[in-house]
């Protein structure tokens, strides 16, 4: 006890050491802000406020910046942004590893949730028989007429996400699979346009093919991902392949600037330990996309409702 008090005094006196339950000290976190990026899909934005709220709960300073979801890995590398908390393998794996290879970005661990980012249909479209043979992609050869829209020139329409996510991946895939005569890719302006399309297609009882992902709020509604030829490293056109492949069943990682463990050792320990499940990430998205909450309020609500999950992470390494 005496020993412990002495250590506390020493820590307070120097102002830069913190005491842990085991009597081991670690340097205090810097007061410089931890910069967290905000992208353009709901779980990512809510999770930004969840993680920012956890950092604030230990007295750290946080700053949020809007950032392009591909360019952010270069921003983490050069230190303008501190972390990325949703590195989706299919969409961002390449940018993440490119930045790591250049130096300055570290892998800060993997969430428990596994991911899929793929074209698909609401499950009621399958049940209604609008494309017999789904989820196999081969079914797309015979059902495009049920997926035509006013802007698709008689072809079936794939409503892809914003082009900032995957560039020309989907148009290249449609061509590689020999579907160009029957299907055309259109890009949504934002994620909200995907959810608006889901709602209006359901109301009108018409077929729709959209880009979607899991974990997401749609996990609870029933969404069927199309099964394309299996992904392998290098199969995409952009990676030198023939483009005849779907997306990987992938990981969801966390990334950080290499100085973060030194500048903010407590926050970094928390960040490297935290891990969200499919259900938790789906909940974060649903607070916004189903319950129509503001992202920041949704983050606060998630923290208030789930202290048992995140509080222990703040004790990690103590
Ligand atoms: C990166 N995203 C979850 C939109 O596919």
Image: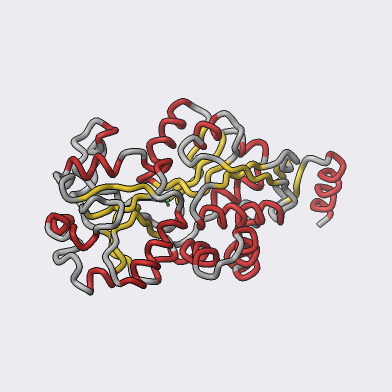
Residue in the picture at 72% in, 45% down: 25
Report the side of 294 relative to 27 (left or right). left
Residue at the image point whose x is 72% and y is 46% from the top: 61
Quarter-of-image position of residue 294: bottom right
Compared across the picture, whether 97 is left or right of 256 comes to left
- Residue occupying the point 53% across, 44% down: 84
| Spot occupied by residue 153 in the image (x, y as percentages of width and height) | 24, 50
Q: Nearer the viewer, residue 20 or 200?
A: 200
Task: State left or right for residue 59 relative to residue 40.
Answer: right
Residue 97, above or below 295: above
* Count of numbered circles on the image: 0
Q: Is residue 193 above or below residue 67?
A: below
Q: Nearer the viewer, residue 106 or 35?
A: 35
At x 60% / y 68%, what residue is drawn?
306
| Residue sticking out furthest to the top | 102
Whole-percent x, y for residue 111 in the image: 46, 54
The image shows residue 141, relative to residue 223, as above or below, that is: above
Q: Position of residue 166 (x, y in %)?
A: 37, 42
User: Is residue 114 shown above or below 184?
Assistant: below
Assign the N terminus to one quadrant of the image: bottom right
């Amino acid at each position: 006890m005496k020993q412990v008090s002495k250590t506390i005094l020493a820590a307070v006196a120097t102002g830069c050491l913190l005491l842990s339950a085991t009597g081991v000290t670690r340097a205090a976190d810097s007061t410089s802000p931890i910069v967290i990026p905000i992208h353009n899909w709901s779980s990512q934005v809510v999770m930004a406020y969840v993680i920012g709220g956890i950092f604030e709960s230990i007295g750290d300073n946080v700053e949020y910046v809007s950032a392009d979801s591909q360019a952010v890995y270069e921003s983490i590398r050069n230190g303008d942004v501190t972390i990325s908390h949703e590195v989706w393998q299919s969409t961002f794996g390449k940018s993440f590893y490119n930045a790591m290879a250049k130096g300055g970005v570290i892998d800060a661990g993997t969430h428990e949730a596994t991911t899929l980012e793929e074209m698909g249909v609401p499950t009621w479209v399958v049940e209604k028989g609008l494309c017999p043979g789904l989820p196999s992609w081969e079914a797309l050869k015979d059902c495009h007429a049920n997926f035509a829209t006013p802007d698709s020139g008689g072809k079936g329409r794939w409503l892809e996400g914003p082009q900032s996510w995957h560039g020309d991946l989907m148009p290249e895939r449609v061509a590689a699979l020999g579907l160009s005569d029957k299907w055309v890719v259109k890009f949504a302006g934002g994620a909200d346009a995907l959810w608006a399309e889901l709602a209006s297609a359901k109301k009108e009882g018409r077929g729709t093919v959209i880009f979607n992902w899991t974990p997401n709020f749609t996990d609870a509604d029933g969404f069927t991902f199309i099964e394309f030829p299996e992904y392998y490293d290098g199969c995409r056109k952009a990676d030198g392949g023939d483009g005849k492949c779907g997306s990987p069943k992938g990981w969801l990682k966390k990334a950080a600037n290499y100085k973060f463990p030194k500048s903010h050792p407590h926050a970094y320990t928390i960040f490297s330990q935290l891990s969200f499940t499919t259900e938790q990430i789906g909940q974060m998205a649903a607070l916004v996309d189903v319950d129509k909450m503001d992202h920041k309020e949704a983050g606060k609500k998630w923290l208030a409702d789930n202290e048992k999950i995140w509080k222990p992470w703040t004790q990690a390494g103590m």
